[in-house]
Image (cartoon, rainbow, N blue to C red):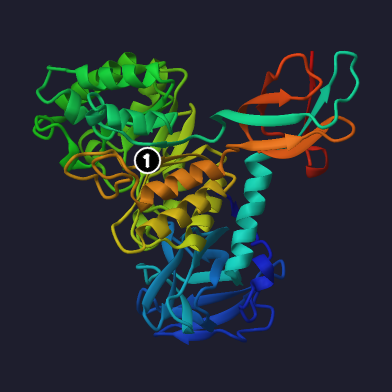
Amino acid sequence: MQCLKDPLKAQYNGGIVVNPELNDGLNGWSILGDAKIDNIVSSDGNKFIIASERKGPYHGFSQKFQLEKDKFYVVSGWVQVNHGDDANLAVIFKTQSGFQHAAWAIAKSGCWSMFKGGLVVNASGPAQLYFETNNTAIDIWADSISVKPFSQEEWNSHQSQTIEKVRKSKVAIQVVDSQGKPLPNATISLVQGRANFPFGVAINKNILNNKAYQNWFFSRFKFTVFEDEMKWYSTETSQGKIDYSTSDAMVNLCKSKGVSIRGHNIFWDDPSMQPKWVPSLNPQQLSAAAGKRVTSVVTKYRGQVIHWDVMNENLHFNFFESKLGAGASATYYRLTSLLDKKATLFLNDYNTIEDQRDGASSPTNYLNKIKQLRAGRYTGPLGIGLEGHFVTPSQPYIRSALDTLASAKLPIWITELDVQSSPNQAKFLDQIIKEVVGHPAVQGLLIWSAWKPSGCYRMCLTDNNFKNLPTGDVVDKARATLSHEGLIGTTNAEGYFETSLFHGDYKAIITHPSMTYSSFHHNLTVIPTTESDEIRLLSYKFTAT
């Protein structure tokens, strides 16, 4: 999020970029379109490239590469403009099959901004990197540019290492007898209770009177979000006539099963998603109605939801801002925070990780929206909600986007994950789940697959008899991967059993031939630690009486 006086060194020493830090003149770089390019040395000796006298949005400097199919490319660098307002800058590769956006930056005058992104290509062949912005009156400056390829094996290995480090802790369990002596050859069976990593699925009102739906859902998940039932157009179809009966029934059902709920949503900034009576209100009437809406729904469900999506999709839309002024979102975040002191308030939008062509909700614009909220005097808890409605995922772009967003040091949740129907739907879903669970900044994941007899929004997990579809099998496998179902171990000569466990609650069932009773159990909670790998060991001592 910082804009620096000098750029940092190129990541990965530039990877496959020739002359990444411009210390060798313009070697490796060429003109694209109609522009002038120069190698410039700053007053403190830093060298960088400038594109000036640009006649078109994409005109400037470029570099050509040979990219390989099945490689993951991470792209990064630093940019600046010479004067004027901040510029939205796209980092693009021209390939044999078309144009691929790899990253976005907000380039400022007077300091260097970092960009980070990624891409994969459909076929091996030539590719040309260039930078694009609509404002042709500005000069583009760039430095420390990197394009780093990774193999599938390297990518997956990093994913596994991150999961081991961030989602798990090393655990040592010692079993001793009633005299405190180590008990070797004791059998320890671990049964996992509530997992530390929230993993859930959206539901809708169809669950209320459908036992098969309830059995399928509640046997698997402890986190959910309602598809429509808490939205304004569902609870106040006519002005002043507020009906929470359906959402109440769903909240009560979830509470009875120990399932946590995200509050989705208080407002939706899309003009087409308002209650039918709202668009015709004048600004004064809208302000009054919106104030009543916040007070009504938040006081109704405070203490019963863990999050609020206060202004849904306000990176793409601005219904409330267009009627009530630029500070409308911040106003309602402040009001919600006053009414509910416990819930985390979230931004929530689409295409930030799923479609790198969409500059409106790019990671850098998302960070900018956070700054706007803070500038609007909202200082309370804030979370980053990423919907995740995918067509074809780009794993390097997902990871790089999450890296960028993580710089805000706020909780990140994937809130509405689904994948468009295709022969690769289940495969893509599996890739995305692994990518987001493997990122240390992601704190929760919800699948957007609320069941309807007529079909789900874009992706179902079951058929109408609640038998898993291939997508449901992917979700079940992911849940199993994040748990330790059926884990059994045996203590060594010193009475110890050591393993690595996902964070969460467990019941350890211990048996030994010498025990008077057939078994006994202890409860334990495995928590994240901040210590180094060498001392990240949680120790438990159980006495077999």
Determine which quarter of the picture holds residue 213: top left
> In the shown orientation, is residue 250 left or right of residue 495?
left
Q: Position of residue 20 (x, y in %)?
A: 63, 75
Q: Please state which of residues 472 and 372 is positioned toward the viewer in this rendering.
A: 472
Determine which quarter of the picture holds residue 481: top right
Circle 1 Cα neighbour tier, 10 Å, few/some/many (<14 / 14–19 / ≥20): many
> In the shown orientation, is residue 156 left or right of residue 82?
right
The three-letter amino acid code for the residue at tag 1 is Asn
> In the shown orientation, is residue 36 left or right of residue 330?
right
Q: Is residue 492 visible?
A: yes
Q: Please state which of residues 134 and 397 is positioned toward the viewer in this rendering.
A: 397
Q: Is residue 388 visible?
A: no
Classify 131 as above or below 232.
below
Q: Position of residue 34 (x, y in %)?
A: 39, 85
Q: Which residue is mark 1?
A: 348
Q: Position of residue 461 (x, y in %)?
A: 33, 45
Classify 427 as above or below 513.
below
